Protein backbone atom coordinates (compact mmCIF):
# COMPACT_ATOMS: atom_id res chain seq x y z
CA UNK A 1 0.00 0.00 0.00
CA UNK A 2 1.41 3.36 -1.04
CA UNK A 3 1.43 6.37 1.21
CA UNK A 4 -1.81 8.15 0.50
CA UNK A 5 -3.41 11.36 1.57
CA UNK A 6 -5.15 9.48 4.37
CA UNK A 7 -3.91 9.13 7.92
CA UNK A 8 -0.58 7.31 8.06
CA UNK A 9 -0.78 3.94 9.73
CA UNK A 10 0.57 3.62 13.23
CA UNK A 11 2.30 0.40 12.22
CA UNK A 12 4.46 -0.32 9.22
CA UNK A 13 3.25 -2.65 6.50
CA UNK A 14 6.62 -3.08 4.79
CA UNK A 15 10.27 -2.78 5.69
CA UNK A 16 13.55 -3.08 3.84
CA UNK A 17 16.23 -5.42 5.18
CA UNK A 18 19.46 -3.60 6.11
CA UNK A 19 21.29 -6.53 7.70
CA UNK A 20 20.57 -9.86 9.41
CA UNK A 21 22.17 -12.44 11.64
CA UNK A 22 20.90 -16.01 11.23
CA UNK A 23 21.95 -16.79 14.81
CA UNK A 24 21.42 -13.41 16.41
CA UNK A 25 20.31 -12.21 19.80
CA UNK A 26 17.73 -9.45 20.11
CA UNK A 27 18.86 -6.05 21.37
CA UNK A 28 15.31 -4.93 22.14
CA UNK A 29 13.68 -8.03 23.67
CA UNK A 30 15.67 -9.99 26.25
CA UNK A 31 15.96 -13.68 25.56
CA UNK A 32 14.75 -13.54 21.94
CA UNK A 33 17.11 -15.10 19.45
CA UNK A 34 17.05 -16.56 15.96
CA UNK A 35 17.14 -14.76 12.63
CA UNK A 36 17.47 -11.16 13.79
CA UNK A 37 17.05 -8.50 11.13
CA UNK A 38 17.76 -4.78 11.11
CA UNK A 39 15.35 -3.06 8.76
CA UNK A 40 13.87 0.33 7.93
CA UNK A 41 10.12 0.82 7.74
CA UNK A 42 8.88 2.09 4.40
CA UNK A 43 6.38 4.65 5.68
CA UNK A 44 7.59 5.92 9.03
CA UNK A 45 11.28 5.45 8.14
CA UNK A 46 12.12 4.07 11.57
CA UNK A 47 14.84 1.51 12.21
CA UNK A 48 13.34 -1.76 13.36
CA UNK A 49 14.55 -5.02 14.83
CA UNK A 50 12.65 -7.96 13.39
CA UNK A 51 12.59 -11.66 14.20
CA UNK A 52 12.53 -13.66 10.98
CA UNK A 53 10.66 -16.95 10.63
CA UNK A 54 12.92 -19.96 11.18
CA UNK A 55 12.99 -21.39 7.67
CA UNK A 56 13.13 -18.05 5.85
CA UNK A 57 16.06 -16.59 3.99
CA UNK A 58 16.66 -12.89 3.50
CA UNK A 59 18.64 -10.58 1.25
CA UNK A 60 20.01 -7.12 2.00
CA UNK A 61 17.69 -4.57 0.41
CA UNK A 62 14.76 -6.99 0.23
CA UNK A 63 11.30 -5.52 0.86
CA UNK A 64 9.47 -7.67 3.41
CA UNK A 65 5.89 -7.61 4.66
CA UNK A 66 5.69 -6.86 8.38
CA UNK A 67 2.00 -5.90 8.66
CA UNK A 68 -0.22 -7.37 11.35
CA UNK A 69 -2.05 -9.97 9.21
CA UNK A 70 -0.55 -12.55 6.86
CA UNK A 71 3.17 -12.36 7.54
CA UNK A 72 5.09 -15.18 5.88
CA UNK A 73 8.78 -14.52 6.55
CA UNK A 74 8.46 -12.53 9.77
CA UNK A 75 7.77 -13.89 13.26
CA UNK A 76 7.50 -10.48 14.92
CA UNK A 77 8.64 -6.88 14.97
CA UNK A 78 10.69 -6.77 18.16
CA UNK A 79 11.17 -3.03 18.50
CA UNK A 80 12.78 0.17 17.32
CA UNK A 81 16.52 0.46 16.98
CA UNK A 82 18.76 3.46 17.43
CA UNK A 83 21.13 4.23 14.54
CA UNK A 84 24.14 3.69 16.81
CA UNK A 85 22.92 0.15 17.61
CA UNK A 86 22.76 -1.16 14.03
CA UNK A 87 25.74 -2.94 12.46
CA UNK A 88 28.23 -1.07 10.30
CA UNK A 89 26.92 -3.13 7.35
CA UNK A 90 23.41 -1.85 8.05
CA UNK A 91 24.74 1.71 8.41
CA UNK A 92 26.50 1.38 5.05
CA UNK A 93 23.35 0.02 3.35
CA UNK A 94 21.04 2.65 4.82
CA UNK A 95 21.61 5.52 2.32
CA UNK A 96 21.00 3.17 -0.66
CA UNK A 97 17.82 1.77 0.86
CA UNK A 98 16.53 5.23 1.77
CA UNK A 99 17.19 6.40 -1.78
CA UNK A 100 15.23 3.37 -3.02
CA UNK A 101 12.31 4.32 -0.71
CA UNK A 102 12.43 7.96 -1.85
CA UNK A 103 12.35 6.84 -5.53
CA UNK A 104 9.59 4.27 -4.96
CA UNK A 105 7.37 6.70 -3.03
CA UNK A 106 7.81 9.66 -5.39
CA UNK A 107 4.15 10.68 -5.14
CA UNK A 108 4.37 10.99 -1.34
CA UNK A 109 7.55 13.08 -1.35
CA UNK A 110 6.42 15.38 -4.18
CA UNK A 111 3.12 15.80 -2.33
CA UNK A 112 5.10 16.72 0.79
CA UNK A 113 7.00 19.42 -1.12
CA UNK A 114 3.79 20.74 -2.70
CA UNK A 115 2.12 21.10 0.72
CA UNK A 116 5.09 21.95 2.99
CA UNK A 117 4.56 24.75 5.50
CA UNK A 118 6.77 27.17 7.44
CA UNK A 119 7.92 25.79 10.82
CA UNK A 120 8.62 29.23 12.30
CA UNK A 121 7.93 32.74 10.99
CA UNK A 122 11.51 32.86 9.66
CA UNK A 123 12.10 29.25 8.61
CA UNK A 124 10.25 27.13 6.05
CA UNK A 125 10.30 23.34 6.39
CA UNK A 126 11.63 23.02 2.81
CA UNK A 127 14.77 24.92 3.87
CA UNK A 128 15.62 21.93 6.10
CA UNK A 129 16.16 19.83 2.96
CA UNK A 130 19.85 20.00 1.98
CA UNK A 131 20.33 22.05 -1.18
CA UNK A 132 17.22 24.19 -0.57
CA UNK A 133 18.21 27.64 0.65
CA UNK A 134 16.33 30.95 0.46
CA UNK A 135 16.80 31.22 -3.33
CA UNK A 136 15.45 27.75 -4.17
CA UNK A 137 12.73 28.13 -1.56
CA UNK A 138 11.41 31.25 -3.31
CA UNK A 139 11.53 29.57 -6.74
CA UNK A 140 9.84 26.40 -5.44
CA UNK A 141 7.05 28.34 -3.68
CA UNK A 142 6.51 30.56 -6.76
CA UNK A 143 6.24 27.49 -8.99
CA UNK A 144 3.84 25.72 -6.58
CA UNK A 145 1.59 28.82 -6.54
CA UNK A 146 1.32 28.54 -10.36
CA UNK A 147 0.94 24.75 -10.49
CA UNK A 148 1.84 21.96 -8.07
CA UNK A 149 4.75 19.73 -9.03
CA UNK A 150 3.76 16.41 -10.62
CA UNK A 151 7.01 14.47 -10.06
CA UNK A 152 10.75 14.78 -9.42
CA UNK A 153 11.47 15.68 -13.07
CA UNK A 154 8.90 18.48 -12.92
CA UNK A 155 10.51 19.76 -9.70
CA UNK A 156 13.95 19.59 -11.30
CA UNK A 157 12.85 21.28 -14.55
CA UNK A 158 10.68 24.06 -13.10
CA UNK A 159 12.58 24.86 -9.89
CA UNK A 160 16.09 23.99 -11.08
CA UNK A 161 16.72 21.79 -8.03
CA UNK A 162 19.05 19.07 -9.31
CA UNK A 163 18.64 15.49 -8.09
CA UNK A 164 15.84 16.02 -5.53
CA UNK A 165 16.05 12.32 -4.57
CA UNK A 166 19.63 12.82 -3.32
CA UNK A 167 18.62 15.89 -1.26
CA UNK A 168 15.64 14.08 0.30
CA UNK A 169 17.79 11.01 1.02
CA UNK A 170 20.39 13.19 2.72
CA UNK A 171 17.70 14.85 4.87
CA UNK A 172 16.26 11.48 5.97
CA UNK A 173 19.77 10.25 6.84
CA UNK A 174 20.29 13.38 8.99
CA UNK A 175 17.04 12.65 10.82
CA UNK A 176 17.85 8.97 11.39
CA UNK A 177 21.39 9.67 12.62
CA UNK A 178 20.15 12.34 15.03
CA UNK A 179 21.97 15.25 13.36
CA UNK A 180 18.85 17.40 13.34
CA UNK A 181 16.27 18.67 15.78
CA UNK A 182 13.22 18.83 13.47
CA UNK A 183 11.81 15.72 11.82
CA UNK A 184 10.10 16.11 8.48
CA UNK A 185 10.00 12.46 7.45
CA UNK A 186 11.17 10.09 10.20
CA UNK A 187 8.37 9.33 12.66
Image: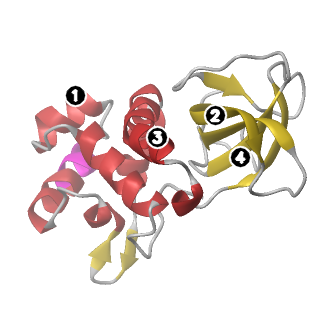
- Relative placement, left or right, of 136 versus 21 is left
Camera-side residue of 145 and 64: 64
Classify mark 4: helix, strand or loop: strand
According to the picture, the residue beneath numbered tag 1 turns out to be 153
Residue under the point 44% across and 76% down: 181
Q: Taken as a whole, is the magenta stretch helix, strand or loop?
A: helix
According to the picture, the residue beneath numbered tag 3 turns out to be 89
Whether residue 106 can be seen here: yes
- Callout in the foreground (3, 4): 3
Query: CA–CA distance between discs 1 and 3?
Result: 32 Å
| Image-quadrant location for residue 142 | bottom left
Looking at marks 2 and 1 on the same chain, the residue that comes earlier in the sequence is marked by 2
According to the picture, the residue beneath numbered tag 4 turns out to be 49
Camera-side residue of 144 and 159: 159
Query: CA–CA distance between discs 3 and 4?
Result: 15 Å
Q: Which residues lie in the magenta part?
A: 142-147
Residue under the point 58% across and 59% down: 85
Which part of the image, by quadrant, shows the C terminus?
bottom right
- Callout in the foreground (1, 4): 4
Q: Which mark is residue 71?
A: none
- Relative placement, left or right, of 165 versus 5 is left
Q: Residue 124 at what x, y percent from top left?
A: 31, 70
Q: Residue 65 at what x, y percent from top left?
A: 73, 26
Q: Residue 155 at what x, y percent from top left?
A: 22, 38
Verify whether residue 33 appears in magenta: no
Q: Residue 34 at what x, y percent from top left?
A: 82, 35
Looking at marks 4 and 2 on the same chain, the residue that comes earlier in the sequence is marked by 2
Q: How many marks?
A: 4
Q: Which mark is residue 20?
A: 2
Amino acid sequence: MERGHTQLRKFEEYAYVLDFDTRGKSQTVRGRDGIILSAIGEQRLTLLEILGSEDSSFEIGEKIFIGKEGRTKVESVLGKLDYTKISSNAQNELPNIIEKIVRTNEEYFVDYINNAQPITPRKHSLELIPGVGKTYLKIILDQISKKKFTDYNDLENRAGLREPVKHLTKRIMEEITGQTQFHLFVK
